[in-house]
Amino acid sequence: MLTITIASNDAASAAHLLAALQQTGLVKTVKNWTISSDKLPDAGDMSPDVVFLDLSRDPEHFFAFAAHVRRLRPAVKVVALSAILPPSHQLLLEAMRSGVQDFLPKPVNADVLAQLLTRFSEDLDIKERPSLEKLIVVMGAKGGVGTTTVAVNLGVQLTTFAKKRVVLLDFSRPLGNVHLLLDLHPRFSVRDAVENMDRLDGHFFAGLLTAHKTKLEILGGIMQPEEWQRIEVASLERVVNVAQSTCDVVLLDMGSQFSSEWTPILRMARMILIVAEANVPALWTLERRLLALKGFGI
């Protein structure tokens, strides 16, 4: 996982970049630094793996900041973001002198950003991923076996006795009913997270959650089956990444329906808990589900 610094004087642009970074699942911490002509960080303030320069019309102070950080930490990766691409010859020359290694257009594309951070992680030999520690997927061998009951009770136990901050994502299809078991009335759902992907960072995500008296927090499920037609699994993967950036444990209630599209999310999980019953239909379905997961490389 990477430690990031965003150097920016534009709050809206920095917020958009923060959301995109947290959605990659490759970021440990993000620190914002406001660029000024009379203040540069000292060694105690600055230990990032990657610095993003959110360039303004006057990039001189940004490049001075980058050069200063490179002196403090020679191995740091420096990326410039500019609304004007391709950059001029003079801008490229100044950027290279200050240690900039990549240019990205604004607004930043989440997929391009993920590819860049993956390359940086390999260059810096950083292999730790939050997904290896935080995500537990609960799915049913078939419908009606109590998947949501298990997910809810597991969440309450982890919150109450392990004293962890736990978020339960209700991704069950066609309808989510986690809120019914907890007697909650969520104002927001999975749909709200997906439809606001451009600003979905940890702070915005926290505002979508509904808390139970046990302190278990949930992201409500879909209330109308047709809403799933407008939701892509790739977007749900980014929601999971943001959840992992803010919580100790992320539980995901998948219900009983899944397909190969869900493979990236399933591969994130430290554990996939499959709920079944001791009867022929459930065990027959369980066997085929295990074969399917093996076929997906899990």
Image (tube, helix red, strand yellow):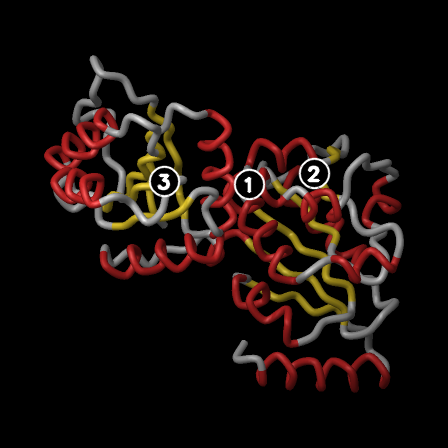
Residue 132 x/y as whole percent:
46, 58
Circle 3 crowding by C-alpha within 10 Å: few under 14, some 14–19, many from 20: many
Q: Are marks 1 and 2 in contact (CB under 8 Å)?
A: yes
Dot 2 corresponds to which residue? 217
Tell me the amino acid under the disc marked 2.
Glu
Q: Of the residues tagged 2 and 3, which is closer to the observer?
A: 3
Residue 128 x/y as whole percent:
36, 55
Say if 80 sits above or below 146 in the image. Answer: above
How far apart, in angstroms, are the residues tagged by discs 1 and 3? 32 Å
Say if 253 sits above or below 250 in the image. Answer: below
Q: Residue at x 64, y 61 (%)?
A: 137
Q: Earlier in the sequence, mark 2 or mark 3?
A: 3
Residue 45 x/y as whole percent:
24, 25
How far apart, in angstroms, are the residues tagged by discs 2 and 3? 38 Å
Tell me the amino acid under the disc marked 3.
Ser
Q: Residue at x 59, y 57 (%)?
A: 237
Circle 2: element type: strand
Q: Are marks 2 and 3 in contact (CB under 8 Å)?
A: no
Residue 142 x/y as whole percent:
81, 74
Relative depth, front residue between 75 and 286: 75
Dot 3 corresponds to which residue? 82
Q: Earlier in the sequence, mark 1 or mark 2?
A: 2
Q: Earlier in the sequence, mark 1 or mark 3?
A: 3
Direction top: furthest residue: 38
How far apart, in angstroms, are the residues tagged by discs 1 and 2? 10 Å
Circle 1: element type: loop
Relative depth, front residue between 24 and 165: 24
Say if 235 sits above or below 206 in the image. Answer: below
